Amino acid sequence: MSDSISDLLDNNARWAGKIQQEDSKFFERLAAQQRPKYLWIGCSDSRVPANVITGLAPGEVFVHRNVSNRVENTDRNILAVVQFAVLSLKVKHIIVCGHHDCGGVGAALTRSTDGPLRDWVSPIRALALDKKCLQSDFDNQKDWVNRVCEMNVEDQVTTLLQNQYLKEAADSGQQISVHGWVYSLQNGLIKDLNVSASNLD
Ligand code: CO
């Protein structure tokens, strides 16, 4: 547990020293080029760090995180990330990884927030209503939120498969698989939602 901001810099110096000791060319290699096979689109939640939970080293995954792992066609940030990851880095897989007990999904469903955050998550509530996924169908609110967390991931996978850069890549024969996963805060395990599809399908 790091309590003070200076701890972070101390941690960093120790980490860099340890890597350098284990593999003296590590930073030199990475500085020359990044060639990740994966694009990760996940939630900003501090408990779901992409590299840590997948055991990937620096250089192995290109990461975009936002509240509730949304892929919005009006969001230039995510569109730029997908453009770069697909056309320049030529990633082979895009993973949308949500997580159960997502605060953004909960806030969307209970409308318990306001301001930009409310605007950002409101499509999730619209999605649940559109799919007729209502609280009354569940024993408790937690199960409802968790189901919508999964539904939200599935929806982002669908959106990505229609993305212009994935289509462009398909036209030139570059295959990209899109996957939908959900992470459990309870046990640290990722569940594959089995919605994987390719831009060439
Ligand atoms: Co979340």
Image: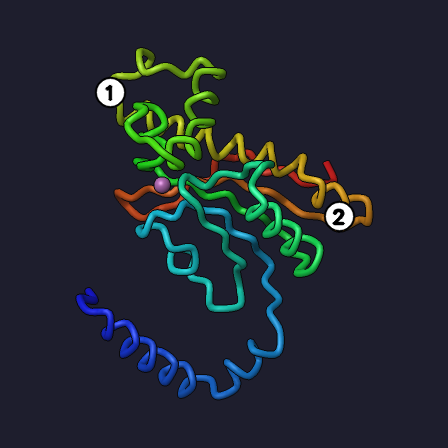
Q: Quadrant of ligand 1?
A: top left
According to the image, label 2 marks what residue? 169
Residue drawn at the location 60% of the way across and 36% of the way down? 73
Residue 167 in the image: state x and y as whole percent.
74, 41
Q: CA distance from mark 1 to mark 2?
A: 43 Å
Residue drawn at the location 75% of the way across and 48% of the way down? 169
Q: Residues within 10 Å of mark 1 (few under 14, many from 20)?
A: few
Which residue occupies the extreme right position in the image? 172
Q: Report whether the residue tagged 1 is closer than 8 Å to ligand 1.
A: no
Look at the image and tell me in which quarter the N terminus lies.
bottom left
Q: Quadrant of residue 38?
A: bottom right
- Colouring of the image: rainbow
Q: Residues within 10 Å of mark 2 (few under 14, many from 20)?
A: some
Comparing 199 with 107, the one in front is 107
Q: Quadrant of residue 160?
A: top right
Residue 192 in the image: state x and y as whole percent.
47, 40
Instruction: State whether residue 113 is above or below residue 2.
Output: above
Comparing 89 with 7, the one in front is 7
Residue 31 in the image: state x and y as whole percent.
56, 78
Residue 130 in the image: state x and y as whole percent.
49, 16
Comparing 88 with 92, the one in front is 88
Instruction: Specify the amino acid type for callout 1.
Output: Asn
Residue drawn at the location 52% of the way across and 60% of the way down? 61
Instruction: Specify the amino acid type for callout 2.
Output: Ala
Q: Secondary structure at mark 2?
A: helix
Q: Secondary structure at mark 1?
A: loop
Residue 41 shown left or right of residue 7 in the figure: right
Look at the image and tell me in which quarter the C terminus lies.
top right
According to the image, label 1 marks what residue? 140
Residue drawn at the location 42% of the way across and 27% of the way down? 122
For marks 1 and 2 on the same chain, the one whose residue lies earlier in the sequence: 1
